[in-house]
Image: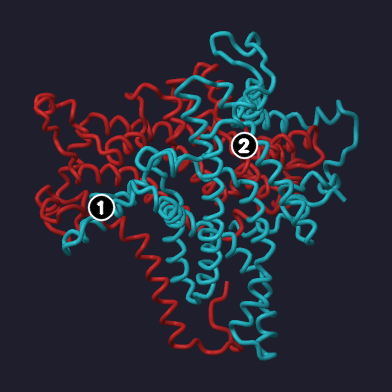
Chain colours: A red, B cyan
Amino acid sequence: MKTANPSWAERPTLIGRFGKGTVLTGIVVCVLFPLYMVVLTSLSTQEAVTRAGGLVLIPGELSLAAYEQLFAGGVVTRAVLVSLGVTTVGTLISLTVTVLAAYGLSRPGSLLHRPLLFLVLLTFLFGPGMIPKYLVVSGLGLVDSYWSLILPVAVTAFNLVVMRAFFMNIPKEVTDSARIDGAGEFTILARIVLPMSKGVTAVIGLLYAVGYWNSFFDAVLYLNDSSKWPLQLVLRQYVYQGQSLFAGQSADTALAGHAMPPNLAIQMSIVVIALLPVLFVYPFVQRHFTKGVIIGAVKG
Amino acid sequence: MLEQTSRPGPAGGLTSSAGPTDRGAHRQAGTRWARLRRDWPLLLMCLPAVGLLLLFHYVPLLGSVIAFQDYSPYVGIKDSPWVGLSNFQWLLLDESFWHATLNTLTITAFQLVFYFPVPIVLAILLDSVIRPRLRLFIQSIVYMPHFFSWVLVVTIFQQMFGGAGLLSQLLRENGYEGVDLMTNPDTFILLVTAESVWKDAGWGAIIFLAALAAIDQNLYEAAAVDGAGRWRRLWHITLPGLRPVVILLLILRLGDALNVGFEQFFLQRDAVGREAAEVLDTFIYWRTLLTGEWSYGAAAGLVKGVVGLILILVANKVAHRFGEQGIYKRAS
């Protein structure tokens, strides 16, 4: 990475610098501004939302009422717990399986190395359609089970290959010397290889975790029972499609044709809840996203 | 830390099975039995991943045979009657299939022009930011939306551009009528492209940033000494340096021409209507899972998969013809 303008380069022109600054600022604002409004609206009181006539731009009275209401139990609380559970269990399983296989495939010349690697790589080129996949999952009796959100997506060939490429870059002298000292493969993996690969493990773990947290269509497909819905489905139902979260609780008003209007602050709170884990974990892992991750895998 | 992976050596990725002598300790010597005794822990480690891939990738792949049957879940694959290619015949005569295909290809072509270059430009722009801290800050912000789910992205766009969204709100305050871009089929292609750019353009820039970092800085200095200005350096050094990656990603995109991102369209199909928002995947979903015509959907999925495979092989061949590396090397 360059750290200073090299001496041979011409001095940046004023217009160039101004133009670049404007464009970059514009890009950053485009990403952050919607998030700012969503968070602010979720923290505003109903009066502030009404006064703004929609999303709140300028902070008025703030309150946590929307969050208190959502976490008092009910649909959203349950969905958050489901999503957290699936994400935790899924990520643990995915990481374990991926690390093991990446190490198992990191030694060319070992028994069955080529056919097994081929089996993994072939999944890049050709995938099964949605229908046969659904039939297998339902044939295994996983419909309406949380395992249907985990097992079919537990290994991603891409992540496996990234991890393997990283393991193969560890100098073989390191592992060989441990082997001479009598360490088995599992010991070498746990004691030497993994501690040397914290960064890549964190990144792959994040990629898996985000996948599970964001899992949406699999849940549409496999979970018929709406009481099992993860957060993303709740987000679609009650925010994107705008159904009232409390319709069931106020049956009398619904009967009179006056279903409670979806409260914007509550809706935006659901958005924030769906956003929050990503925002929390992201800064810790983000510094590892340097150039190598993707290119090492795709390019080989 | 991960910089190491940018040079995976001769034995990384898709071509890795090439060199049997890479690791001296594991030469292909000895009998099968001796190798099994030596390598069984490695095999054991591969077992869970291989099992999962077999179960959820290869078994469904075999299950695609129901495309040639009149499959009924109550009878099972074994006893369902075979109908030859008739599902495919029906498919080719199905107007809504062609409509979905046309929509998919239109969106792919549109995004190739209006989405594909964005990460490249963004990467060049980011690469020109000299202060490391500022650069890192901008990078981490533009990467972020990649990690949001499609439901979230679509919801956020709805809050901005929907009938009750910010844009309409501002228009109404200033005495105009509100607009609802989320349900307008005419502007739908712009909307989905904007969503894709917002979500993934930043993340897509990573790979180009890596390619930019790999360009020899001495080339720039030599060119500058020879009197090349910044635009000529961009044209003669930066862009050629990016070419292999651009071609690689173009190949991957072409191979993926029939995939335009399923969830994004699945979510918005109802609001916008089939006319504009039906793509191949949503066609398969609505045609099959809601009517129970399993074999028909499997046939459509098979056609899509085979065409995708052919596309990627052809694109790769073309890349080889032009002397580029492509996704896998030639067999030689």
**Tag on residue B304?**
2
Quadrant of the drawing holding the N terminus of chain A: bottom right
- Outermost residue toward the right in this view: B30
The percent coordinates of residue B77 (x first, y second) are 63, 14
The percent coordinates of residue A6 (x first, y second) are 58, 84
Residue under the point 59% across and 30% down = B93
**Residue A14, located in which quarter of the rendered image?**
bottom left
The percent coordinates of residue B204 (x first, y second) are 53, 57
Mark 1 vs mark 2: same chain?
yes
Q: Chain of mark 2?
A: B
- Where disc 2 sits, the SS reads helix
The percent coordinates of residue B87 (x first, y second) are 62, 24
- The answer to whether B331 is drawn above or below residue A101 in the figure is below
- The answer to whether A11 is drawn above or below residue A40 in the figure is below
Q: Is A239 left or right of A56, judged from the image as shown?
A: right
Q: Is residue B68 visible?
A: yes
Residue under the point 31% across and 41% down = A240
- From the viewer's side, name the closer residue of B83 and B262: B83
Q: In the rendered structure, which disc, 1 or 2, sits on the residue that comes first in sequence?
A: 1
- Amino acid tagged 2: Lys
- The answer to whether B77 is drawn above or below residue A116 in the figure is above
- The answer to whether B24 is drawn above or below residue A150 in the figure is below
- Where disc 1 sits, the SS reads loop
Q: Nearer the viewer, mark 1 or mark 2?
A: 2
Residue corresponding to mark 1: B165
**Tag on residue B232?**
none
Neighbour tally class for label 2: few under 14, some 14-19, many 20 plus, Cα within 10 Å: some
Q: Is A62 left or right of A296, judged from the image as shown?
A: left
